[in-house]
Amino acid sequence: MLQIDSSEFKKKLSHIYNEVSKELFGFGTTLLRTAVDNGTITLYARHRRSPRSTILEGEAPNLKYEVDFYMSSIYKKKLKERLENDLQLHIEVLLRDYDPATQWAVTNIILNTEAVR
């Protein structure tokens, strides 16, 4: 397993994050920063606005909000699976907040340090 604070680990982490984004939305992020501190990983990502999202926002804002909520939940599930499988991380919890108005998402990953010992 890679050291979680290494630049190689952060590159792989960013790559996986973008792959999940491409799988679900058809494109990756426009900006992605990764920070690692004492068993916690934080990703700051600016996503691209989907043309469908823009249309829904004008025609059915409540539906857009609901779709954003479910897509964020699916994103969390897929990202957690990929990180555990590809990077052998022991994730205690993966939290993600997405702001549709600005397209920013912040993901916090708390590793289960007990499983690593």
Image (cartoon, rainbow, N blue to C red):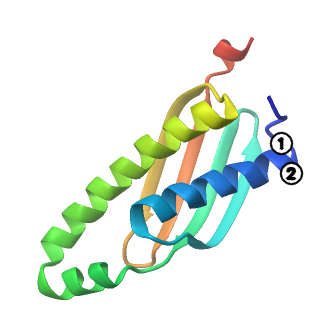
Which residue is at 68% across, 35% downward? Answer: 87
Answer above or below: position of 30 versus 89: below
- Tell me the number on the disc at residue 7: 2
Residue contact at pointers 2 and 1, CB within 8 angstroms = no
Q: Quadrant of residue 18?
A: bottom right
Please state which amino acid type lies under the numbered disc 1: Asp
Please state which amino acid type lies under the numbered disc 2: Ser
- Tell me the number on the disc at residue 40: none
Answer above or below: position of 61 versus 1: below
Name the side, left or right, on which 93 lies relative to 25: right
Secondary element at tag 2:
helix
- Location of residue 41 in the rendering, given as x and y in whole percent from the top left corner: 67, 44
Which residue is at 59% across, 31% downward? Answer: 85
Name the side, left or right, on which 11 lies relative to 96: right
Q: Quadrant of residue 52?
A: bottom left
Which residue is at 29% across, 78% downward? Answer: 53
User: Dot 1 surroundings within 10 Å: few (below 14), some, or many (20 or more)?
Assistant: some
Q: Quadrant of residue 37?
A: top right
- Location of residue 105 in the rendering, given as x and y in whole percent from the top left corner: 50, 63
- Quarter of the rendering occupied by the C terminus: top right
Tally of numbered discs: 2
Secondary element at tag 1:
loop
- Location of residue 94 in the rendering, given as x and y in whole percent from the top left corner: 50, 39
- Tell me the number on the disc at residue 5: 1
